[in-house]
């Protein structure tokens, strides 16, 4: 319930199937592909027959996305030439984008859209979600007009009527061994602020969790 059958899995499923309506013909970009939502979103898109490219911030995460989550490809946004990698993956443009990051990666995606592409806005980790706001908007937003594309924000609980079908589909994939996920566990409630910061530093792989222990009993 903390991963594939909870918020992460439902958000990934709703974004890929309802907002983006991913199909076999799609070339899909998932930013934040080593995170708890992005890793599942990319796998779901692949299971629906699409070709999927992820982005991650370390070589270790890139390897995990490619080899364990089995994306078709993954780029290191800190080390790779992102525009070149997008052109190589989708010469005719990206038809669907599941964005968890915002910032420069979203701008790169907007510059490489296919006509009538769809973008699902799930998060904006690059902004840090600070009190000052959510970072600068994409300077090249008019690419949406030029490519006649659609960009839509969503929150999974607006689609509660879809939950039973979503959970049944996710359970089937899990039972068949077709969905994997990672958990990054930090021990102790006192370490919760540091664990939260790991999300914005890009230090976590998969779902960031805090394990709460009783000091007197050691019970979980």
Image: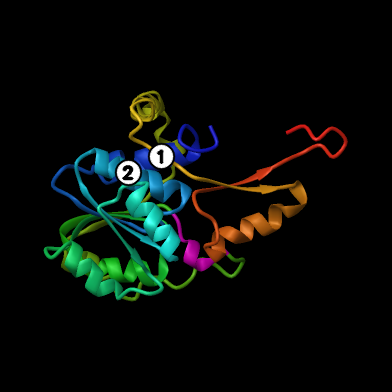
Residue sticking out furthest to the right: 216
Is disc 2 placed on a helix, strand or loop?
helix
Tell me if 2 is positioned left or right of 156 in this view: right
On the image, the x and y values in percent for residue 133 come to 54, 67
Tell me if 185 is positioned left or right of 94 in this view: right
- Comparing 163 with 149, the one in front is 163
Kindly report the distance in space between the C-alpha atoms of the residues bearing marks 1 and 2: 8 Å
- Comparing 59 with 20, the one in front is 59
What residue do we see at 76% from left, 39% from top? 213
* Residue 49, image quadrant: top left
Image quarter hosting the C terminus: top right
Q: Sequence order check: which comes first, mark 1 or mark 2? A: 2
On the image, the x and y values in percent for residue 200 come to 55, 63
Give the extent of the magenta segment. Answer: 123-129
Tell me if label 1 and label 2 are in contact, CB under 8 Å: yes
Q: Which residue is mark 2?
A: 43
- Would you call the spot at circle 1 few (<14 residues within 10 Å), some (14-19), or many (20 or more)? some
On the image, the x and y values in percent for residue 183 come to 54, 44
Q: Which residue is mark 1?
A: 180
Q: Is residue 90 magenta?
A: no
What residue do we see at 38% from left, 30% from top? 174
* Residue 215, image quadrant: top right
Tell me if 51 is positioned left or right of 140 in this view: left
Q: Is residue 128 magenta?
A: yes
Residue 101 appears in the rendering:
no
Residue 16 appears in the rendering:
yes
What residue do we see at 36% from left, 61% from top? 55
Tell me if 48 is positioned left or right of 57 in this view: left
* Residue 142, image quadrant: bottom left
């Amino acid at each position: 319930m903390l991963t594939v059958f909870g918020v992460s899995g439902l958000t990934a499923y709703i974004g890929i199937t309802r907002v983006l309506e991913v199909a076999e013909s799609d070339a899909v970009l998932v930013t934040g592909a080593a995170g708890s939502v992005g890793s599942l979103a990319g796998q779901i898109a692949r299971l629906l027959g699409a070709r999927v490219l992820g982005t991650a911030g370390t070589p270790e995460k890139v390897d995990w996305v490619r080899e364990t989550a089995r994306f078709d490809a993954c780029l290191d946004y800190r080390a790779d030439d992102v525009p070149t990698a997008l052109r190589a993956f989708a010469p005719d443009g990206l038809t669907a984008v599941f964005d968890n990051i915002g910032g420069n990666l979203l701008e790169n995606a907007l510059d490489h859209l296919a006509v009538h592409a769809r973008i699902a806005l799930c998060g904006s980790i690059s902004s840090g979600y600070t009190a000052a706001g959510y970072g600068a908007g994409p300077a090249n937003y008019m690419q949406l007009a030029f490519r006649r594309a659609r960009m839509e924000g969503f929150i999974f609980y607006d689609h509660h009527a879809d939950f039973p079908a979503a959970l049944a589909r996710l359970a089937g994939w899990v039972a068949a061994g077709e969905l994997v996920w990672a958990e990054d566990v930090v021990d102790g409630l006192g370490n919760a602020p540091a664990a939260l910061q790991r999300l914005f530093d890009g230090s976590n792989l998969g779902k960031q969790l805090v394990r709460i222990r009783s000091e007197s009993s050691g019970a979980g």
